[in-house]
Structure formats: structure tokens, C-alpha cells
Amino acid sequence: MKKQLFDEVSYASSKLVTQKYSTSFSLATRMLSPKIRAAIYNIYGFVRFADEIVDSFHDYDKEALLLKFEKEYFLSKHMGISLNPIMNSFIHTVVSYNISDHLVQAFLKSMKADLYKTEYQTKEEYEEYIYGSADVVGLMCLKVFVNGDQEKFDELKDAAQRLGSAFQKVNFLRDLKDDYQELNRSYFPNVNFGDLNEKSKQDIIEDIERDFEYAYKNGILKLPVEAKFGVYMAFRYYKRLLKKLKAVHHSKIMETRVRISNPMKINLLARSYVKYKLNLI
């Protein structure tokens, strides 16, 4: 009984991390079936903390912290428990939904790259980073959504990766100022962000739009009912972000960080819900 109480605290901690760090992701997660919400909070808590290490803890030894985090994951999985509540809840989800170590290792590899790599000069490097930082997170969530149905997982995995890629690329474009000027990172290959032109910006947007289109037609429409509305809500949110980024002049994109206001989020939620209830998605 006491261990159950600790696990409940762990799950509540991951939910709190999600709510505090991302109101938009938290809102989308609340649109999932209650049966799977906690598992998605648990995944978010784990990836959020790893990301915070490399992006925010500038006054500390980031490499030591990330390596400790990685070692704790493997030790905790072996033992079946962690005194870090975020790690403890994530381990529960990994075991419950058979999330492979390959996905976790690929994620941590991309996080490690953020410690030392500042430019991605080839498409291959760029795609490998996105696979680890975003695609595998989509695959972890898909493991939860299909709940052990391997055939369904195999059918939807490409779309899950493309949706993860689209979300990450939108984040890259939205966060250009912070990534380029503050963290000295440049993710998009062969793009001069010191003098971004309209064609380069348009090429990036068209690439994201192709990812979105593929993910919608080949993934979102085919998701289990427990997951469909929540994922569609996240899709609509990021599509709106991209629309706002598209409207920003290329010369101003480094000076602008677009946001979706809370009233607009509610508007998106309401319109998305109507479509969902009318079986239009």
C-alpha cells in the first residue's frame, strides 16, 4: 500500500511538470482518454527534464547531470523503482507499454548532442537529431495509444514519426532567436540564419507542411478513439503556430516568437471538438 502511495505521488509529479512547463501539451493530454493520460504525462516529464538539463541549467555541469540522468534510467529500469518520482513514473510507463530501450537511447543521444554540437550541416545529421529528439517521443506515445497492438503500431509508426518531426521543426522555427543567439545552435542545414531569406524560410515551411499532411492522412485519422481527439488537438495547435510563423516576414523571424493566446487555444479546442463529434476526423 505504501509503495502504491509513492507511485501515486510519482504520477502526480509528472502531471504537474506537464502543466507547469507546457499549457498547450497539458491541454491536449487532457483531451485523451483518462485511461492513457497518466502514461503520456509520465513520458512528457522524462523528456522535459532531460531537455531542461541541456537548455536551461547553464550554471551547472550539464554533461554530468545528463549522464547521471541516463545512468539513473537504466538502474531504475533494472530495479523497477526510482526515488526520483519523474523517473519512477516513466519507468512504470516503459514497462507497462513495452517501450524499447532503443527509443530511450536515441532520445538521450540527441540530448547529448545538444551539449556540444552547434550546427547540422547535412540532411543526415539533421534527420538523425530529429529522430532522437522528437520522432522517438512520438513512437513512445504511440506505444501507449495502441496498448500492445503491434500490428496497429507498425501501421501508424511512420505517421507518428512524421508528426513528431513536424512538431519539432515548428519549435525550431519558433525558437530561432533563443537557439541561434543564446544557445548558439543552428538545426536547419544549409541555412544562413544571420541572413535568412524568404526562399529558405519557405522551404522549411513547405517541408513541415508535407510532414503534417502525411501524419494527418496516414496517422491521426486512424488512431484509436482513446487518442484521436487529443492528438488532433495538438496537431491543430501546431498548425496554427505554423500559420502564424508563415505570416512573419523572413527578416523579422529572428526577432519574433509567436504564441497562441489562451482565448485562441480555447477556440481551437471548441472547433476541434465539433469536428470530432461530427466524425469529421
Image: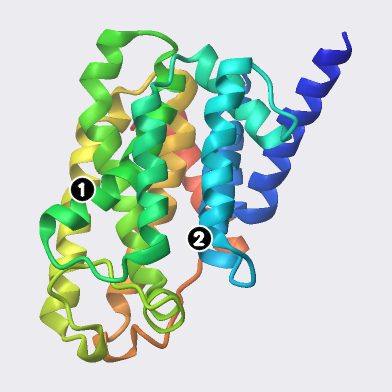
Q: Is residue 13 visible?
A: yes
> For residue 162, what is the image quadrant?
top left
Vertical placement of residue 87 versus 58, above or below: above
Vertical placement of residue 19 versus 191, above or below: above
Secondary structure of the residue carrying numbered label 2: helix
Q: Position of residue 209 (x, y in %)?
A: 20, 55
Q: Which mark is residue 211?
A: 1
Crowding around mark 1 (Cα neighbors within 10 Å: few <14, some 14 to 19, many 20+) is many
Of the image marks 1 and 2, the number of the one nearer the N terminus? 2
Task: Residue at 59% x, 29% y: name it.
Answer: 90
Q: How is the image coloured?
A: rainbow
Secondary structure of the residue carrying numbered label 1: helix
Task: Residue at 51% x, 44% y: name it.
Answer: 47
Q: Amino acid at mark 2?
A: Val
Q: Nearer the viewer, residue 74 or 141?
A: 74
Vertical placement of residue 101 versus 166, above or below: above
Residue where numbered disc 2 is placed = 54
Q: Amino acid at mark 1?
A: Asp
The reply, left or right, for residue 61 in relation to residue 169 is: right
Look at discs 1 and 2 and give the one toward the viewer: 2
Crowding around mark 2 (Cα neighbors within 10 Å: few <14, some 14 to 19, many 20+) is many
Task: Residue at 41% x, 81% y: name it.
Answer: 177
Q: Quadrant of the C terminus?
A: top left
